[in-house]
């Protein structure tokens, strides 16, 4: 039987483990589940919130998802706005979206991100995660375009080598044609990569608000 003193001892022992000792806190929580039922309501919510955040930090995404909705509901019902200096509702939502992404549930992750952006339209982390979801779901066209870019770059390199080793020394009359092919292949490769990112941002912009800026285009070079 656990007495009143024991209730608080579990609570304080849990927090004594350390703020960043995520695995140790998860282990302690899961080894003492019977004591959690004897905590006060406030203590239990505090422990449960910290525990689920620890799950996220150590990559226990499926377990996080199994508990997230219930805690999000409690946060709403109890009007819990801040936890450890963070807007806990937004934080849980974002972590839920990240867990869905990390477990391959990209469509569900998108839906959660859209809910976040309705509350916080300038949330750059959510926008970045939305872009990752689109890249994953648009793998056919996105990866195909990248493959085309790689082929163009490899063609440009091959032509440049041929131009240097064969055409220039022995077939000078073909030098202009090969130079044109080299520049064309290189240009097409660059256009494919840039166009890929521009189109992706256009798709994202249609769904969550257009914020196109050239300096923020993230070109993923194949080399």
Image: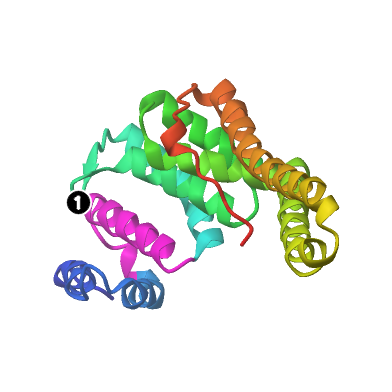
| Quarter location, residue 103 | bottom right
With 20 as the anchor, is 203 left or right in this view?
right
| Quarter location, residue 48 | bottom left
Q: Quadrant of the N terminus?
A: bottom left
Residue 206, above or below 26: above
Residue 78, above or below 21: above
Q: Quadrant of the C terminus?
A: bottom right
Q: Which residue is mark 1?
A: 84
With 160 as the anchor, is 50 left or right in this view?
left
Judging depth in this view, the residue of 152 and 198 nearest the camera is 152
With 45 as the anchor, is 207 left or right in this view?
right
Within the magenta stretch, is there residue 143? no
Which contiguous range is marked in magenta?
A: 35-59
Within the magenta stretch, is there residue 53? yes
- Please, what is the dominant secondary structure of the magenta stretch? helix
Instruction: Estimate the x, y position of residue 74 in percent, counting from the top left.
Output: 36, 40
Q: Residue at x 49, y 21 (%)?
A: 209
Judging depth in this view, the residue of 32 and 204 nearest the camera is 204
Judging depth in this view, the residue of 183 and 219 nearest the camera is 183
Colouring style = rainbow
Instruction: Estimate the x, y position of residue 7 in percent, counting from the top left.
Output: 21, 67
Instruction: Estimate the x, y position of residue 205 in percent, counting from the top left.
Output: 54, 25
Q: Residue at x 18, y 46 (%)?
A: 85
């Amino acid at each position: 039987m656990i007495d009143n003193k024991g209730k608080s001892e579990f609570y304080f022992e849990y927090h004594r483990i350390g703020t960043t000792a995520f695995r140790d806190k998860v282990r302690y929580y899961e080894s003492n589940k019977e004591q959690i039922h004897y905590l006060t309501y406030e203590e239990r919510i505090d422990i449960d919130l910290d525990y689920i955040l620890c799950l996220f930090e150590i990559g226990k995404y499926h377990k996080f998802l199994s508990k997230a909705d219930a805690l999000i509901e409690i946060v709403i019902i109890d009007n819990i706005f801040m936890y450890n200096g963070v807007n806990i509702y937004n934080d849980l939502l974002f972590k839920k979206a990240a867990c869905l992404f990390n477990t391959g549930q990209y469509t569900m992750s998108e839906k959660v991100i859209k809910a976040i952006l309705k509350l916080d339209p300038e949330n750059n982390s959510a926008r970045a995660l939305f872009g990752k979801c689109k890249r994953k779901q648009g793998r056919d066209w996105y990866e195909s375009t990248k493959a085309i870019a790689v082929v163009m770059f490899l063609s440009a390199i091959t032509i440049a080598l041929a131009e240097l080793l064969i055409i220039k020394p022995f077939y000078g009359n073909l030098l202009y044609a090969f130079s044109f092919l080299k520049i064309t292949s290189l240009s097409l490769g660059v256009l494919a990569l840039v166009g890929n990112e521009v189109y992706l941002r256009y798709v994202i912009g249609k769904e969550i608000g257009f914020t196109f800026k050239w300096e923020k285009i993230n070109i993923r070079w194949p080399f």
